[in-house]
Structure formats: structure tokens, C-alpha cells
Image: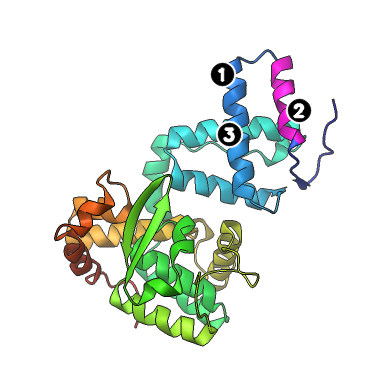
């Protein structure tokens, strides 16, 4: 069976999954294990998108994405599958470390981004001419959205102050605080964005997760902020901590973060949306 030459990067090809499953069969792995590993590798390749290049940087960004979208036990099982795949294609030295469930919670305090560190990141990004990155960070931190939900922020949504997002088969609404609304209006006008996605590449595609991750790390290095604290999902954590500290309302926070099973339609037929707005306006993470 053909193998891949060991290197710091390689390009994924569809036939690799076929060869990988044959390899697992030769090892006499259980059919259920083979099916799961193949499914997990397909999830990874979907994450890669059009650029199928596998590098350590993209693997680390994928790990953060898994942490953002799955429970820790699922993250570790998917990492195990990916590591086996990396070993098979002779890229075993790029294997990812498992996430320690207890340690993940206990060590988070040392990785939490403070409000002042966040504002320093934004200021540094603007000083370096990275207006898009600065605006992305402010949007995520002011709303608590996942990085994968940025693509739902469109010019057409800004005036209404309401964005409907879809994630993992579920829909919910995201409210835009007034200060962010103002900043987005100015940004759109300066960049000459007339319609469609606000945060996209020059070719009009949604921003790639790994690129945003890389840009944030570069800005953090310049700003002198611990790189371990700086990754997109930590902005969501900062929003959540600040919201709860300000409102002490876990139920409201769960709705805003999309952790509730309550249907979106219930929000429109109750006073919930007004309560959300009142709570969001109390958050003072963005500088005027």
C-alpha cells in the first residue's frame, strides 16, 4: 500500500480515507471503530474546506474548533481518530494532545483573557492596520457568537440589529448591541461594503477560521499578551463571564449563547428579546 513521505505538511486526497480504512481492516479493528474513524476524518476534511493542506497550524486550529463545538469526551475521541490517520500518512509527529477534562477546567483560569487584554488586542490591531481583524474580535466579544457564525453577519442585518444564525442544525437570533451597531456601520461605510457578508476575503468567501486564529496570535505577540490566552473561542468565554458578572442571569446567558433548547419562535412571542437587549447594553467590553 502506498504511504506518504514524512514532512511538515501534505495535501489531503479523497483516496486517503479509502486507504486508511483498508489499513484499519488489516489491523482487524472492529467495524464500528473503522466507521467512526472514517466519519471523524471526513469531519476534519470538511473543516479544511477548499484548501486541503494539512499543517501543524491547521491541526491546532482544528483542535480549537472541536473544543468550541463538541464536548471534551467527543473532542478526545475525534483527536484519537485523527492521530491514527496522521500516523498512517507518516505525519505522526504532528499528532495532537488530548484535552484533559479535569485539567481543562482547572487550568482555564490561567488562560482566561481579561477585558483589558482584549481591548489591548483591538487597539494593537487597529494601529497595525488590521481593521477587519479588530472588527471581528469586537463583534465576537460583544455578542458571544462562535467564529463559525461570523458569516451570518451581513450588511442587511445591521440596521435591524438582529442576526439569525444557524449552527449544528439549530437556529437562534443574535442581538447587536448599540455600540457594536455603530462600529459596524462605520466599518461598512469605510470599506465600501454594500451588501452581503461583512467579514469575507477579497474573493468574497467567508473568512477561514485558521487565518483568523493566525492573525490574532500575531497581534497578541506584538501587544505582549500571553499567546495561550489568545484564540477566537476565548472571546466567547470573555463575553460569557462578563455577562454573568453583570447580570447574574444564567438562563438569559444560555439563550444568548445558543445553549438552550428553546425554539427561536418563542423569543419573538415573548418579552425575552427586550430582556436580552437590556442585558446586552450593560456589557462594557467595547471602547467607544
Picture coordinates of residue 71 (x, y %)? Answer: 41, 38
Q: Which residues are magenta?
A: 15-26
Against 88, residue 191 (above or below) is: below
Q: Secondary structure at mark 1?
A: helix
Mark 3 neighbour class, 10 Å CA radius: few under 14, some 14 to 19, many 20 or more: some
- Does residue 108 appear in the picture of this structure? yes
Upstream in sequence: badge 2 or badge 1:
2
Q: Secondary structure at mark 2?
A: helix
Residue contact between numbered discs 3 and 2, judged by CB atoms under 8 Å: no
Q: Secondary structure at mark 3?
A: helix
Mark 1 neighbour class, 10 Å CA radius: few under 14, some 14 to 19, many 20 or more: few
- Between the C-alphas of marks 2 and 1, the distance is 17 Å
Taking the image as shown, residue 38 lies to the left or right of residue 190, namely right
Mark 2 neighbour class, 10 Å CA radius: few under 14, some 14 to 19, many 20 or more: some
Q: Which residue is mark 3?
A: 40
- Between the C-alphas of marks 1 and 3, the distance is 12 Å
| Residue drawn at the location 62% of the way across and 35% of the way down | 41
Against 159, residue 34 (above or below) is: above
Taking the image as shown, residue 177 lies to the left or right of residue 272, namely right
Picture coordinates of residue 192 (x, y %)? Answer: 53, 84
Viewport quadrant of the C terminus: bottom left
Q: Which residue is mark 2?
A: 19
Q: Residue 32, which numbered label?
A: 1
Upstream in sequence: badge 3 or badge 2:
2
Amino acid at each position: 500500500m502506498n504511504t506518504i513521505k514524512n514532512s511538515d505538511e501534505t495535501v489531503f486526497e479523497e483516496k486517503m480515507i479509502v486507504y486508511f480504512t483498508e489499513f484499519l481492516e488489516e489491523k482487524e479493528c472492529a467495524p464500528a471503530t473503522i466507521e467512526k474513524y472514517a466519519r471523524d476524518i471526513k469531519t476534519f476534511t470538511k473543516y479544511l474546506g477548499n484548501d486541503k493542506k494539512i499543517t501543524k497550524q491547521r491541526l491546532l486550529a482544528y483542535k480549537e474548533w472541536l473544543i468550541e463545538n463538541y464536548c471534551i469526551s467527543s473532542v478526545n475521541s475525534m483527536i484519537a481518530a485523527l492521530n491514527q490517520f496522521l500516523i498512517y500518512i507518516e505525519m505522526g509527529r504532528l499528532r495532537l494532545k488530548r484535552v484533559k477534562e479535569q485539567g481543562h477546567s482547572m487550568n482555564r483560569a490561567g488562560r482566561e483573557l481579561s477585558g483589558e487584554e482584549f481591548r489591548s488586542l483591538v487597539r494593537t490591531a487597529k494601529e497595525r492596520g488590521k481593521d477587519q481583524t479588530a472588527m471581528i474580535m469586537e463583534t465576537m466579544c460583544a455578542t458571544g457568537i462562535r467564529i463559525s457564525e461570523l458569516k451570518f453577519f451581513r450588511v442587511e442585518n445591521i440596521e435591524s440589529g438582529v442576526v439569525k444564525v444557524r449552527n449544528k442544525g439549530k437556529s437562534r437570533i443574535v442581538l447587536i448591541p448599540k455600540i457594536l451597531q455603530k462600529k459596524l456601520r462605520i466599518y461598512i461605510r469605510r470599506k465600501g461594503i454594500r451588501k452581503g457578508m461583512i467579514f469575507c476575503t477579497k474573493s468574497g468567501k467567508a473568512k477561514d477560521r485558521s487565518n483568523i486564529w493566525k492573525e490574532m496570535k500575531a497581534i497578541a505577540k506584538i501587544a505582549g499578551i500571553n499567546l495561550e490566552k489568545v484564540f477566537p473561542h476565548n472571546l466567547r468565554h470573555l463575553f460569557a463571564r462578563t455577562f454573568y458578572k453583570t447580570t447574574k442571569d444564567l438562563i438569559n446567558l444560555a439563550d444568548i449563547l445558543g445553549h438552550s433548547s428553546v425554539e427561536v419562535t418563542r423569543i419573538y412571542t415573548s418579552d425575552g428579546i427586550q430582556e436580552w437587549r437590556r442585558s446586552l447594553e450593560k456589557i462594557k467590553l467595547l471602547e467607544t
